[in-house]
Image (tube, rainbow, N blue to C red):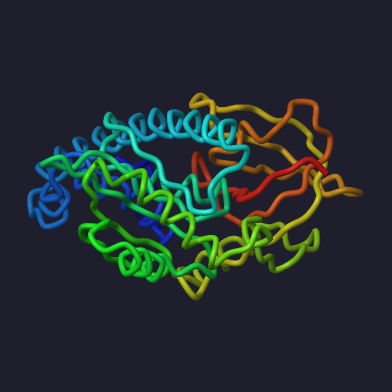
Amino acid sequence: MAGRNRAQLSAADIGYYLGPRLNAAGRLEDMSQGIECLLSDDLDAARTIARRLDEINRQRGDLTTEIHAQALDRIERVARDAGELPFGLCLFDPSWHQGVVGIIAGRLKERLHRPVIVFAPDRDGKIKGSGRSVEGMHLRDALAAVATAHPGLIGHFGGHAMAAGLSLTADHFEPFGRAFDAEIRLRLTADDLHGRLLSDGELATGDFSLDTAKLLREAGPWGQGFPEPLFDGVFEVVSHRVMQDRKTLKLWLRPPGTSLTLEAIAFGRAPDFVPGTARVRIAYRLDVNDWRGERLQLRVEHLEAA
């Protein structure tokens, strides 16, 4: 259902394509559907469940897009009214869905380069938040400090350095937001709120090959503490196209001084690209596009005009 070649599955395919479909059931409905799909000995039954998981994942994607847009509008109002964003940002709306707040928090953290907690209604007048943090800011420790300084403000909380969850009564949301921001300001400076990507440098023209991409894919699995190699460089824009979802950008790029044209995909980066831009600086990973054959593709993680 994920459109991947079963004979060439990689750890990245499991993380980017299979995992989200299994996870979506737990976010919106019942995680047992994913477990049943994995454990089923009946291929037809497993395919039926897989189709349902794919449908749920599409619903999750639509819901995430809608709430993400609402959160960005809320952030614009906060910045306009206060003159700046909090160092520790908390957002809540009674219409938001508990199953996607962690995804939203992660996207906003990447965009704003600061700890973000997004809340949605839980039950019995309580709200539940899912938070994501930035490098060097231990989120669970910050929540523990807030709980110590303000007894009774937080219900339950837990997590680790980069992600945490907590529950509050709805009337505690605003005082918690102020206390959380104050605690983050003790731990981070304004300079810490600028995003940073660590690159393995530029690639030579001869390294842009399908063989190199396959070698890197087979060298994994990559993950926390063992990140997939990330490269950067300036490229001439040969052409571009915004995909049907209006968020994904397809680019054809040329290393300056060469006749080589490279295909690149930038998920969620279409709003960052201004048509007519002649040169871009990108941070990217080498990837294998196996749709209708195999070819090299650059998977863009960051994009800016050069």
On screen, 81 above or below 297? above
Q: Quick check: 249 above or below 186?
A: above
Residue 163 in the image, given as x and y percentages of width and height: 38, 61
Q: State the quadrant of the C terminus.
A: top right
Q: Which residue lies furthest to the bottom in this view?
A: 225
Q: In the image, is residue 79 above or below residue 223? A: above
Position of residue 31 measured from the top left corner of the image (x, y, whole percent): 15, 49
Between 152 and 3, the one lying in front of the other is 152
| 174 sits left or right of 46 in the view | right
User: In this view of the protein, which residue sits in the foreground, 273 or 253?
Assistant: 273
> Looking at the image, which residue is at 41% across and 69% down?
161
Q: Where is residue 38 in the image (x, y as percent from the top left)?
A: 16, 55
Look at the image and tell me in which quarter the N terminus lies: top left
Image coordinates of residue 72 in percent, x first then y, are 50, 33
Q: Residue at x 54, y 66 (%)?
A: 186
Residue shown at 54% from the left, 70% from the top = 136
Which of 173/223 is in front? 173
Asked whether 271 or 161 is in front, the reply is 161
Q: Quadrant of residue 45?
A: top left
